[in-house]
Image: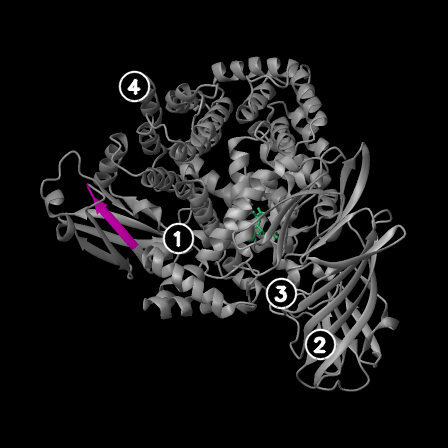
Amino acid sequence: MADSPEQFRGKSRLPRFAEPLRYDLLLRPDLAACTFSGSAAVAVAVSAPTRFLVLNAAELSVDGSSIRFQDLAPTEVVQFEEDEILVMGFQQELPVGEGVLTMNFTGTLNDQMRGFYRSKYEYKGESKNMAVTQFEAADARRCFPCWDEPAFKAKFKLTLQVPSELVALSNMPVVKDTVHGPLKTVYYEESPLMSTYLIAIVVGLFDYIESSTLEGTKVRVYTQVGMTSQGKFALDVGVKSLDLYKDYFATPYPLPKLDMIAIPDFAAGAMENYGLVTYRESALLYDEKLSSASNKQQVAITVAHELAHQWFGNLVTMEWWTHLWLNEGFASWVSYLAVESIFPEWNNWTQFLDETTSGLRLDALAESHPIEVKVNHVSEIGAIFDSISYDKGASVIRMLQSYLGAERFQKALASYIKKYAYSNAKTEDLWAVLEEETGEPVKDLMTTWTKQQGYPVIYAKLNGQDLELEQAQFLSDGSSGPCMWIVPMTSCCGSYDVNKKFLLKDKTDKIHIKDFAASQIADRGQNFWIKLNIDQTGFYRVKYDDELAAGLENAVKTKKLSLMDMIGIVEDSYALSVACKQTLTSLLRLLNAYRHESDYTVLSHVTSVCLGVDKISADATPDLSRDIKQLLIKLLLLAAKRVGWDPKDGESHLDAMLRSLLLIALVKLGHDETINEGIRRFHIFLEDRKSSLLPPDNRKAAYLAVMRTVSTSSRAGYDALLKIYRETSEAQEKSRILGSLPSCQDKDIVVEALNLMLTDEVRNQDAHDVLRGVSLEGREVAWAWLKENWDHVLKTWPSSQLVSMFVNYIVSPFTSEEKAAEVSEFFATRVKPSFERALKQSLERVRISARWIKSIKREPNLARTVHQLLLQEV
Ligand code: BES
Ligand code: ZN
């Protein structure tokens, strides 16, 4: 075994005795046959005596007889499919030093949106194939044999042989191309040191538009032929982001060019390949007449995110997937910084609390995981591209920045980028630079947040003139863990000018209010309030005692608080209710304090809480559920009336977002007037697609309204929507419709929508639109559908994120122990590492809801409070 290829099986990482320095790669995709062939010449540094070379390969056939290391042919060549490695054994030990490894191989252009794959598009009425790559996390090995780990950085020189009429792009600019008949050979410049997961190739028919940064870097957006006008917005955001990051990281954009391209079939939202960023169409293309305000924002955030990676991720790369959050958390955080500066009127940092909210919600599960997570097998990597790496990651960065101060933080980041440019870093490396630059105990502080899962809830109690604090892990199932955090605390009392900052390091602590707010505490009357976690910069929740909670409720009502704090209060309160640490009754009272609110950022959280309450009350208190709906409608109605259905001249971006948000929520809550108006406008729109009565911001609400009238015996609305779906070529519109079809209350229609997803009419990339849209009434049939189609689902959406999404969307809406048991039983023999965590998390959510329901049923004052609040004047 010691001297056999077997010794390399079952390892999480490749051995390091031989490392690649330079790859010379030739690839010949055959777009008609959906195959490719290639050859590689890799300069390898052998650093320790070995008889073996070990690298990654998957779903490739490597021609064993073509392999040479210098002039040596291997005596054994073994491919271990499960470990995705290729082991070459040579007769004798290889000489230490540099040598060149060459080989030929072939593979398939698959249709799984990973590795080297084909995507389909229409050109002049004909269906065509394009060849595209998606290598993150570990799929470069499906295109060419390579050391497919982020720490094996090497230089890459690519050559492509493709049909002469096609555009062929890669990370680097073209050096030359030579046409020989129907084929051309395209040679690209050699790249700087980079990781394999960032290599990209796209071959197809495209048009482009171009602009350039202040430094003169050429930036292009490629779209399908004739569609470049939809790329202008992204191009503009792209150029501005590059200029901004260059200053922020104090390092120029590292490559000679940047291309961004829309791909019709794309698994994620976008991918930051070095110099050739790929996007799904809906995340790159923007058309004033066709896109909604929220589409616009999504494009801006996505572009800003991917371009941030060109520094954070591509220039400086995580050493291993355990540190993925360094990539994703930072790119997410910094994208808000860029978008805030390009579109200050979007109030982007307040919107950042969407990220914090999803991080907090996921991390309140016992089945969450630490930000820094151990990766034992390649199959586990996909599952960590989740809200913990992205949203918790971004949120703890914001927490740290706010603790250290923006300027110091930026300076330290710039040093970090300089220090690790063209190489790799671990989480500790970042902490070390930050400590050095700021002299603060960054490592001790941050380790409690990145190496432990979960986060604390701070219990705050007023005792005379002291504020007593106690931390405990917050879990949605109501339990509590033993973990402790170093918590950067902030508090203010009666006014934002009267505030205090400190670190909570122990289980309990006390602050003397009179030390910083003597007069406020002395005559605390009706308007007395204390808010902890100012502007929600900390990644934790706060549970106030009754007196403090009442003070804050009053402060919400009287508009004393920042938007971010208004959001924090309602989010914390909702989470505490779910965990049965607070009654639904008191949550409803608090929600009532927001009924005069008119700001989008706040209302987006209020609305999401309202919809959560609506959902649970349907199962918890069926008799009261109608009244609760009425109450929730009443809460949103004032703001909804203000924005109405028709856009006002020159209204703000956020009001456009607000209109869409509220109309959708009112339809979901069953508000008849909104539903009828939606249907009325839909019919006008059907006759005249250019009608101003249904601009893109309002369409989703109207489509959902229409679907509420649909049933098997009266299906005109479904058919009308499907007709629009078939006629439009626009991805954002398709996504709105796909999300509406399964929202029907008729179960057979839900199944019809799910089955539509399996046909050629819906791209596999769009499954999540459908799954996310399934109505509460449809959850049983969706589950039955999943069981029936499980093998097909697993085959068609094999990657971790995709299959996890099916499990998560279909299982999580259930709310009973029995259902959880049934789901567990079904998966007992079927579970795989790629979706195991998603399954456990979904089951945990089901059990949390079941527990919440039991507790709601026992609330003595719920019905009375609902009726009281319903009667109260607005
Ligand atoms: N690196 C990711 C893309 C990715 C995700 C690759 C999962 C492999 C697995 C990219 O930078 C990213 O984070 N994209 C986001 C968009 C963003 C705005 C958060 C996405 O795809 O949703
Ligand atoms: Zn990213």
Q: In this view, does 490 lie above or below 712?
A: below
- The disc label shown at residue 665, or none: none
Q: Quadrant of residue 662?
A: top left
Mark 3 and mark 2 lie on one chain; the one further toward the N terminus is 2
Helix, strand or loop at label 3? It is loop
- The disc label shown at residue 398, or none: 1
Q: Measure the alpha-carbon separation of dots 3 and 2.
A: 15 Å
Mark 3 and mark 4 lie on one chain; the one further toward the N terminus is 3
**Residue tagged by mark 4?**
872
Helix, strand or loop at label 4? It is loop
Q: Is residue 371 above or below residue 351?
A: below
Q: Which colour scheme is used?
A: one colour
Q: Nearer the viewer, mark 1 or mark 4?
A: 1
Mark 2 and mark 4 lie on one chain; the one further toward the N terminus is 2
Of the pair 694 and 690, the residue shown nearer to us: 690
Residue 357 appears in the figure: no
